[in-house]
Amino acid sequence: MQRKPIVPAIVVLAILFCLGVFVPGISTTRAVAAERPNVIVIMSDDQGGGDYGFMGNPVIRTPELDAMHRRSGFLSKFYVSPVCAPTRACLMTGRYNYRTRCIDTYIGRAMMDSDEVTIAEFLRDAGYRTGIYGKWHMGDNYPLRAMDQGFQDSLVHRGGGIGQPSDPIDAEGKYTDPTLIKNGEETPMEGYCTDIYFDAAMDFIEQSAKADKNFFTYIATNAPHGPFHDVPEALYQEYRKVDFSPILVNKLNPKRLEQESDKLARIAAMITNIDENVGRLFKKLNALALTENTIVVYLNDNGPNTMRYVGDMRGMKAAVDDGGIRSPLVFHWPAQVQAGRSSDVLCAHIDLLPTLLDACGIEVPDGHKLDGRSFLTLLTGDATTLPKRQVVLQTHRGNEPQRYHHFALHEEPWKLVHPSGFGNERFAGEPSFQLYDLSKDPRQTNNLAQQHPDVVQRLKRGYEAWFKDVSSTRPDNYAPPQIVIGTEHELRSVLTRQDWRHIQGRPWAGNSNGVWLLEAPEAGSYEVEIVFAGDPPAGTATITVGKLIKTLEIPAGQRRGHKTDLRLPAGQMTLAVDVVFEGKTQGPHQVILTRRDK
């Protein structure tokens, strides 16, 4: 006898749901969510944890994010790193950034090892279309770019932000009508940068929907990161009339208050512009009938870029106090997460990757180590707690982390912290630990280290085990990655001060110098062009690659066009360019290497 085909139960449920038939005991949201969700992650840059109406900010307007918050799940105790690139490495990999070689924000230490597996790679390999729009900040050259790390569509700026030495030449500092890097090519754009990112993301989403493909869209704005000279003008004019004193932490004299208020007006204009774009994004999802089963996550990457309102905490960007390392985490997924569901369980940026993979039904391969864990059950209502654990956040300047330097360890309700200063490469003497009970003292005003020495010692041992573990992830754990030149993936490599290894002067100052660590899979012929930040005086430039030395005369007043040809060997090498102007040596602004024989 021929057997009749069995209709899967989920198909029956889906049909009944479409017909409006109620099935007792069956959640219709789970029927809707039978298909895997789309994913959108939005992360702003230097927007502090208090810069939202729903977090109690009385001045900065975020009506669209406030509405999103009302419709979403919410994590109120979500931690990030003190500064940009480390947060991004943790977010992309689900691993502590000290495992990834991405340990700082510039001079070659904001480059993530290409062996790291990103969430874009996991989702791409599972059939998702993947796109990034805005800030990557983990390497500007092959094989370190977002487009090399799983993103199939990429529209980004270089470096850590627009207005830095990595800007394309003649487009420096342009938030409006910027030149961005579209799938590896410098591309002039029209409009304000945040609007451009959201426009491109929405085009990508619509194309994915038309192709009936799931998508992962990462929108990482460089706003409200400085510089602040180019902001949405209409919003800026509105905010110029606003009294910012309610969100200022410190009392300021009249002149300083005027300056700070103008800066905050610019920052607030950028934040409200992001908020307006979030509203546009949801309108697009609604129009495409994608809202129900699309996860939309919103967070910020570190504390605020000025001393301003951070709720009941203290601190700002670069601090390991809670105001410098906390972000609200808004998780919008109507198919699975009820509006208003919230959790105050300790979570962090390392948890987002495992959570999204969990939601998408993607398993992490055996042997692949993650530091994060899924918090999905906290938002679906399947759990109210997770096993207690320790989360460590540490970031400071320098080429190699120092044990105990500028770290915070969290284990509910305790916080063990040594706030020795982000800007210092090292601290002197013995560490002076502080201990706080955040459940009673979120502003960190009562140091309990003397009253609870046993807790200090226990948490200190936990930190030491963590530091030893993350520092031994791979051989030569903190060596910076190499830029690979001369391949079909990137025949023209723009080398900037963002990724050089600094050796002289202040890192980005005009008289500074550095070298680039390169690797060529094979020998090849290259055109080398030296570029300056402005019109230089007459001088000479000496290019050194191993035993190869070439000297160029630099005529006065010529910013670029200083070119020569070099035959570079295969293997690892260091490229140095020493420029002498009026008897003083400095480095170039940028160097462009173009493979000529391929």
Image (cartoon, rainbow, N blue to C red):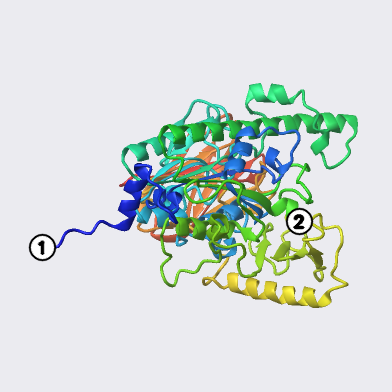
Residue situated in front as seen by the camera: 447 or 106: 447
Q: On the rendered structure, is 63 left or right of 6?
A: right
When asked about the image quadrant of residue 304, the answer is top right
Dot 2, how many residues are within 10 Å of its Cα: few (below 14), some (14-19), or many (20+)? Answer: many
Measuring from the top left, give residue 148's x and y in whole percent: 41, 51
Would residue 590 be visible to someone looking at this image?
A: yes
When asked about the image quadrant of residue 508, the answer is top right
Amino acid at circle 1: Gln
Measuring from the top left, give residue 24's x and y in whole percent: 43, 54
Quarter placement of the N terminus: bottom left
Amino acid at circle 2: Asp
Q: On the rendered structure, is 3 left or right of 411?
A: left
Residue situated in front as seen by the camera: 314 or 565: 314
Q: Earlier in the sequence, mark 2 or mark 1?
A: 1
Which element carries disc 2, helix, strand or loop? loop
Q: Nearer the viewer, mark 2 or mark 1?
A: 1
Kindly indicate whether the residue at mark 1 contacts the one at mark 2 (C-beta within 8 angstroms). Answer: no
Q: Which residue is mark 1?
A: 2
Residue situated in front as seen by the camera: 56 or 447: 56
Which element carries disc 1, helix, strand or loop? loop
Mark identifier at residue 321: 2
Structural distance between the alpha carbons of marks 2 and 1? 69 Å
Can you say whether 432 is above or below 333 in the image? below
